[in-house]
Image (spheres, rainbow, N blue to C red):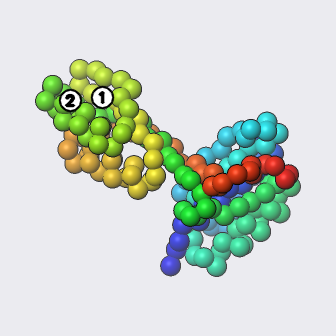
Amino acid sequence: MKEKLVLSVLVDNESGVLQRVASLFSRRGYNISSLTVSETEDEKFSRMTIETNTEPENFRQIKRQLMKLEIVKKVAELNDTDSVSSELLLIKVSAKGVDTKNRLLETNRRFGSRVLDVSLETVTLELTGTGSTIDTFIQEIEDNFGIVELARTGITSLRRGEGSFTEDV
């Protein structure tokens, strides 16, 4: 049975790194369900947060293959108990009329999303949170209002506690 694997991967901050890591997954038949990349507090490095669903026996293999790339400096498996994670959602919602907008704002308040734009027929909201919270919010919006458009980032995670992922590299 497939399980979710979330990896934090510290890589050199240079062009071509994303393509090399993504092609490693592709060549081995692993699907990346979420991928975020950004520069770290040390501009020499970027952090990739990669989520994939695979059999647990593949976890070590994936980590070993990543460490074979000279651009990869460190790989850590993250789970819900030792890390904090978040995603970002931007969603444009159909909201014609005052009554609909008021109902939408009540939903907005319950989930803690932020209003970014209001037009005559739509409201654009921003929500950050866990993947399951965002899934629930999207379903509620879809069931009660209608989605005009949405964009969603992948998971971004940091280990809990003190210290930095880059400190011993």
Tell me: 131 left or right of 18.
Answer: left
Q: State the residue at coordinates (81%, 45%).
A: 12
Q: Which mark is residue 123?
A: 1
Which sits in the foreground, 51 or 79? 79
Q: Looking at the picture, how far across and down is residue 157, in whole percent?
A: 60, 51
Is residue 26 shown above or below 10? Answer: below
The answer to whether mark 2 and mark 1 are in CB contact below 8 A is: yes
Is residue 78 shown above or below 155? Answer: below
Tell me the distance, in whole angstroms, between the alpha carbons under discs 2 and 1.
Answer: 8 Å
Q: Please rate how many residues cluster around mark 1, counting C-alpha atoms within 10 Å: few if below 14, some from 14 to 19, many from 20.
A: many
Task: Please count the marks in the image.
Answer: 2
Extreme residue in the front direction: 162
Q: State the residue at coordinates (71%, 61%).
A: 76
- Based on the displayed image, in which of its 4 quarters is residue 38 positioned? top right
Q: Which residue is mark 2?
A: 101
Please, what is the three-letter code of the amino acid marked with disc 2? Answer: Lys
Q: State the residue at coordinates (39%, 52%).
A: 133
Which sits in the foreground, 104 or 143? 104
Q: Which mark is residue 43?
A: none
Extreme residue in the top direction: 120
Please, what is the three-letter code of the amino acid marked with disc 1? Answer: Val
Looking at the rendered structure, the secondary structure element under dot 2 is helix
